Image: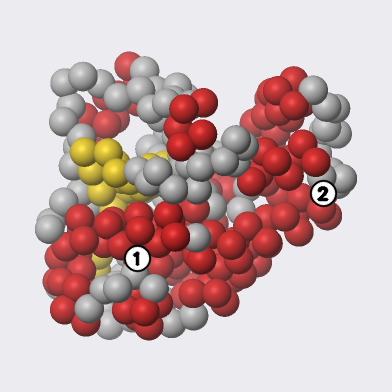
Amino acid sequence: MKPGRIFQSPEVRNLRDFGGWRTTSDRKLASGRLLRSGHWADSKQHAHGLLRQLNPDVFVDLRRPAERKYQPSVLPDDVAIEVLASPGGDQREPPHVRFLREGNLTKASVRAYMHSAYRRIPTETHHLSLFRQTILQLNEGKTVLIHCAAGKDRTGILAALILGLLEVSQDTIMEDYLLTNDAVDIEGLLPVITAQISKRLDIQIAADVLYPMLGVEADFLLEAQKVIGDPMVFAKTKLDLSADDIAQLQNSLLVSN
């Protein structure tokens, strides 16, 4: 575990600061401005206390409308947070739920699904819109918390893109991505999530089948990075960001020491 980077809470999983890393030019990212987590549907007193300490200006909720309706965020009334979300990507069921309902579930099939999801996520219009908005909010000097359901896949891809635009090395980007496996008690969570999904979908899922879906693996992020390619080119061509926008992102978040 990285002291000061991971904020443990029984109510919000995978809450952490993904700033503070060094760049390839040995500059440092500001700490406390780049935050990431899982969903806030179960947040109560403990998580709300952490939220007040972290004091984000903006929540970027990468979940689809159906997910937000099923697990709405619970935020304290006394904290002013702007929430950015997209009406796009609305389906009766999110893709991962549809896969679990219809798929022939084995560890191998779940891992293959994760690979396909990482190739899909960077191409979806609603994600691209939120990726762009996140960077523009950071350019304004705001503290931004990005999250999805588990705070590891959609969130992990966006965090990796931002770190790439800030000229953080691939090794460090991967280190940050893989911290999910330290921040989340996957072994303890596995039977709980398996039982919940089995009940929700009225199917019986074997004990270890969902393991690839609860943690992260380097190959997952590499699939997304193959689709993204050069982060600078992706930002310009897919997010409609200018060279000045990217320079402003760097000026906003890079410090000298």
What amino acid is labelled 2 in the image? Lys
**Taking 75 as reference, is 247 above or below it?**
below
Asked whether, in this view, residue 212 is left or right of residue 56, the answer is right
Picture coordinates of residue 5 (x, y %)? 36, 48
Label 2, secondary structure: give it.
helix
Observer able to see residue 119: yes
Residue at 30% in and 73% down: 240
Residue at 76% in and 50% down: 110
Quarter of the image where the C terminus is located: bottom left
Q: Quadrant of residue 203?
A: top right
Observer able to see residue 30: no
Q: Quadrant of residue 118?
A: bottom right
Q: Earlier in the sequence, mark 2 or mark 1?
A: 2
**Taking 135 as reference, is 95 above or below it?**
above
Asked whether, in this view, residue 4 is left or right of residue 223, the answer is left
Asked whether, in this view, residue 173 is left or right of residue 241, the answer is right
* Residue nearer the viewer, 168 or 73: 73
Picture coordinates of residue 184 (x, y %)? 55, 39
Residue at 21% in and 82% down: 243
Label 1, secondary structure: give it.
helix
Say which residue label 2 marks: 107
**Taking 238 as reference, is 252 above or below it?**
above
Image disc number at residue 162: 1
What amino acid is labelled 1 in the image? Ile
